[in-house]
Amino acid sequence: MTPPDRPKRCCPKCQAASYLFRARKTVEEAEGKYVDTKYRCRSCSHQWWDRVAVPPEMPQADDAAGPCASHPLLPTCGDDRPRT
């Protein structure tokens, strides 16, 4: 498994590409749901927030049937055996 690609970011003050992650919070506004992430530049110590829109959630599978009889820890596994 390959790690996810890091977005190309740089400090808005000095344009250095070396930064540290500081904090993350989810914000819900009238326009939608966002994730605010705080960074700190390693070169000049400038701190800034980056806002990204959260993509809409995918519909969840119907878990109303309950766990599988052969695999009780899994919500569903595709096994057609009767449930106990």
Image: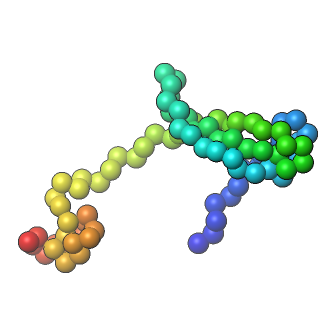
In this view, the residue in front, 58 or 72, is 72
Is 58 situated left or right of 17 in this image? left
From where the camera sits, is residue 20 visible? yes
Where in the figure is residue 78, as x and y percent of width and height?
24, 70
Against 75, residue 27 (above or below) is: above
Q: Quadrant of residue 1?
A: bottom right
**Which residue is painted at 91% across and 39% down in the image?**
14
Q: Quadrant of the C terminus?
A: bottom left
Residue 48 falls in image quadrant: top right
Residue 62: % across, % down: 24, 53
**Left or right relative to 32: residue 6:** right
Q: Is residue 39 left or right of residue 18?
A: left
Q: Picture coordinates of residue 38 (x, y %)?
A: 69, 41
Q: Nearer the viewer, residue 58 or 44?
A: 44
Q: Residue at x 51, y 41 (%)?
A: 55
The answer to which of 10 and 61 lies nearer the viewer is 10
One can see residue 17 in this view:
no
Residue that sits furthest to the bottom in the current view: 70
Q: Is residue 58 left or right of residue 31?
A: left
Q: In terms of depth relative to the viewer, which is nearer, 46 or 3?
A: 46
Residue 3 place in picture, x, y as percent:
64, 65
Residue visible at 23% across and 56% down in the picture: 63
Residue most extreme to the top: 30
**How does the figure colour the protein chain or chains?**
rainbow
Total residue callouts: 0
Image vertical order of residue 29 relative to residue 79, above or below = above
Residue at 40% from the left image edge and 46% from the top image edge: 58
